[in-house]
Image: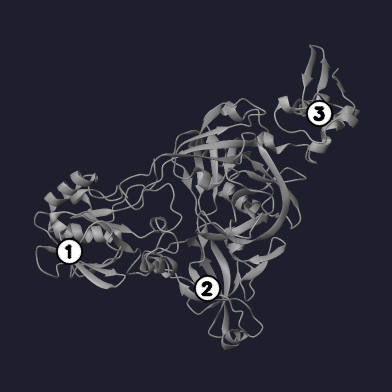
Amino acid sequence: PLRLRVIPPDVRPKHFCGSPGAWPDAWRMICNASRGSALVGPLACRRLVARWRGPPPRCFFATSAALNQSGRDPRDAVVKIFNTRQRPGWTVPWQDQPVESSTGSGAVIRARFGQAGSEVPMVLTAAHVIADSRFLQIQRSTDRFSGEKFQARILAVCHEADLALLSVQNPAALAEIAPLEVAPAAKLPHVFDKVRVVGYPVGGDACSITEGVVSRVEVQEYSHSLRAGLALTVDAAINSGNSGGPLVDAATANIVGVAFQKLVARGVELQGHAVPAPLIQRFLGEAAATCSSAAAETSSPPLHLRLPSLGCDYQSLEPPALRRSLGLGDRAGILISRLHHGGSGSGPPPSMRRGDVLLEFNGYPLDELGFCDLLGRRMHFAAARDLCLVGASVPIKVWREGAEIALEHTLNPARYLVPRGQFDVRPRYFICGGLVFQPLSHEYLQGWSANDRPPHLQNLFLGGHLTPGRTEAVMLSQVLADEANAGYDSGWVGAPIVQAVNGVEIRDLSHLVEVVEAARGGGEAEAGQRQGKEGYLVFDVQMSSGPFRLVLPLEGLEEADARICALYGVPRACRSQHFAPGDDCDGAAEASETIP
């Protein structure tokens, strides 16, 4: 039989923490078993408690003050993530930035892949912890296990929700860990609920716990994706390195959130944010349904998941005069102010129209601010939207021309004139005669501080709109000086936006490549593409100060490209891998955007 003796409780410390060497002598236990005696600490005592059969002896209560009410210490199932990453160079798109290393946290959970797949231990973390990764490793808690690191890989990632799921190549790495449970999808913590943030923040190597309460449950902007989504606000400290670690219920040790950011500003303290359990369960469910069990065991590319968009801009109907002008009576909702173009003309026409008032979304009636009753509380309907899958058809009610109309609305992923939240992708670019063209993106704008960005580019980022005639803002990002482009200055020339090439209005970068290649190769061209003088490429651009024109001679352009590639270290194809080189390019040919 197993027998335990412990120093009397009146001389034990109030809490236990730190490494075994730091435990006071009064907190050492003597385990008398059939194989002899040994000194053990609180962790071993908890394991003995788990093995005990029958009423617990008095000495077992010695560690109860330091355990969760569930009897589970969540630190056992929280790992440290080491990410070796290399971000692309958005200002010099054919070059990568220097290799960097960063750390984060993750929780061991059980996840299922494929319809017939069994649940296996995996690591849940934040997407920004593993973004642009080249090599991933995890390390178990060093005060409970060895300090050995194990290679990991990304199975699924959703950058918009800032969530990722990892597998470990060595199955034995997670075999000794009891996974944490994720709270149900239909449950959100309440304000004042006590929670704990578990992870590996800077300042030490051991797993750390901070405690606090839930302060808010509302829609917040996610800094990683610049997208609004449901989030928990807690006053427990979240520091660099905590990202991706679990936010656990203090009573049950269940995961109620994944730490992903904190608000940093003058006069702001203890405002950390976590992705809530409903979004986590949605992410895990979609990953399980989309990715096969075989993909989870092989080196298949990561599964990139998206969140849905309503496909429009809208405004609140708070002003009473605005509501009266629409004839709503006692109805409430939000005004659809602009529809988003989907980027291709092949899709079905949108169900909503500009000027509609959205009264109800997926069975949830909206008020004049767009709030609804969801999961037992009032919150913005964007939280209900994000619980739906991309491509889902949801019922809506709109007020149109004095009548209520019931419609089915398809939720597609968001598209922007100026992309944002681009990770694990390479920038697209095209070089012709030393003129470097690339799409304007938020990542490119991050080369400046928010107050120093060129106004014409910042205006496109904030208010630019997709139209059938323009789905990207193609800019001339720099000029690589050569005799072919002499007279147009060199380097950064103000990043003008391309309007037309040889009289053809440019839709996106693929279209620009198509027009230029047709002019250079003498193949079939669009109507008007041969406008202007024969033997020249004419680029009409919009500077911040007004329109401007650049002209390149077609004669000698091939030789100029070869000189420029050799001089500036540009790939010989003069374009990114998204476009097939040379005459094989048909403008729209694209390769995978995912970084290998």
On residue 314, the disc is 2
Name the residue at 25% across, 61% down.
Answer: 512
Question: Label 1 belongs to which residue?
Answer: 525
On residue 185, the disc is none
Rounded to the nearest whole Å, what is the CA distance between mark 1 and mark 2? 40 Å
- On screen, 504 above or below 105? below
Question: Label 3 belongs to which residue?
Answer: 49
The answer to which of marks 3 and 2 sits earlier in the sequence is 3
Element on which disc 2 rests: strand
The answer to which of marks 3 and 1 sits earlier in the sequence is 3
Of the residues shown, which amino acid type is indicated by label 2?
Tyr
Instruction: Give residue 400's position: percent from left, percent from top.
Output: 53, 81
Instruction: Give residue 308's position: percent from left, percent from top.
Output: 52, 60
Of the residues shown, which amino acid type is indicated by label 1?
Ala
Name the residue at 66% across, 48% down.
Answer: 237
Q: Are marks 1 and 2 in contact (CB under 8 Å)?
A: no
Rounded to the nearest whole Å, what is the CA distance between mark 3 and mark 1? 79 Å
- Relative placement, left or right, of 288 versus 532 is right
Instruction: Give residue 2's position: percent from left, percent from top.
Output: 84, 19
Name the residue nearer the viewer: 242 or 383. 242
Name the residue at 61% across, 66% down.
Answer: 381
Element on which disc 3 rests: helix
